[in-house]
Amino acid sequence: MGLKELPIEKPGARQVIVRKLTKAEQKIMNKYTPQESAAQKIFLADQTAVQALPTEAPGWVYNKTAADLFRNKTASGRLSNGNIFVTQQNTPLNSILKTYFEKGKSLSKNIKVTTKELKRFPKESPFKDRRFNTCSVVGNGGILKESGCGEEIDASEFVFRCNTAPMDEKYWKDIGTKTTLITMNPGQVHFRYNTFGKAKRIKKPDLRNSSKALKGAFLRDLSAYGDSYLFIEAFLYELSAKRAFLAQQVLLESHAKNEVIFPHPDFVRSVHSYWTGRGVVAPRVSTGLLLVTAATHMCEEVHLYGFWPFHSDRNNRRLTEHYFDNALPSNSHKINDEFKELQRLHNTGVLRLTTSACQ
């Protein structure tokens, strides 16, 4: 399948899909959203942290030599040149996919590729031997609010977005409207859509209708991103693969235009190894950092927006955690350490990091 051509949509040119939080999601968000006193404390602490933070080098210029070196260090050989996704070509019948880890265990699990699973993978990467000129990777940081970066983001040839973040019309000026690839955590299939009715949480009397409603909600939510690629990190552990395959099956059965692509677990393992060696020591890198690394393999110039882990900007303006809410992240990632590395990559010309309002 060739790359889909997605037009840059203008505000008002499409139906606005506003997804409401489920009760379970609202409960979790409330749990992780700090009260005002705690939020003010975080803001003041981050003000101090930002004041001590070095600024990015001005007059950014793309450094192809440095970028190519970075690409070779994060993935090479059979996983280079856009071949960072699982395909029938790099993962043939009866080959083994080794999960990154098993939940609650230190040992990974081998998944043998059967005929059924092989059909889930494209014959070859839709990005094979192709590198886009300019790409935007849109994080979810609160620094995007009032940034006015939407038009600049949409001007990129390819736009990556993280974790099915909201695309409501009120955000368009700051985040843009164009999406070429969106990521989804496989855990969301269970948490947000109750595994499409296969989880035990669903009660009688009408399991069939409940399943239908959950699938419909998934399709409606995904429609906010047009016919973008759906990037699911399926091979973290065995259960995540099952959930990712279910999401893919729902899309296939509904004849949706979205193509599901899975980053190769060997690529994820290589990326994690590289960043661990750089001092980002965590159970695994964030989806944002994985996506940024993947973008450098698919694009020449990579421009980042919304990657800012602080609740204060450089002008002492108070920010929320995300552009759409103030729910704090878990401690499984080292976001501040990741940000320092993004600054380093900016200063060496590998990618461009935007941490202020766009012109």
Image: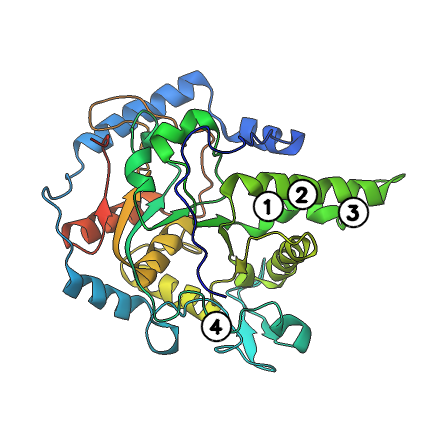
> Mark 2: which amino acid?
Tyr
**How many discs appear?**
4
SS at mark 2? loop
In this picture, residue 329 sits left or right of residue 280: right
Q: Residue furthest bottom?
A: 94
Residue linked to disc 1: 188
Label 1 vs label 2: CA separation? 7 Å
Residue 124 is marked as: 4
Mark 3 or 2 closer to N-term? 2
Mark 3 or 4 closer to N-term? 4
Label 3 vs label 2: CA separation? 12 Å
Mark 4 or 1 closer to N-term? 4
Residue 310 placement (x, y as % from top left): 31, 33
Instruction: Mark 1 and mark 2 in contact? Answer it, CB < 8 Å.
Output: yes
Which quadrant would residue 25 be assigned to in this image? top right
Q: Quadrant of the C terminus?
A: top left
Comparing 197 with 16, the one in front is 16
Q: In this rendering, which labeled residue sits more in front, label 2 or label 4?
A: 4
Residue 261 placement (x, y as % from top left): 51, 61
Residue linked to disc 3: 200
> Mark 4: which amino acid?
Glu
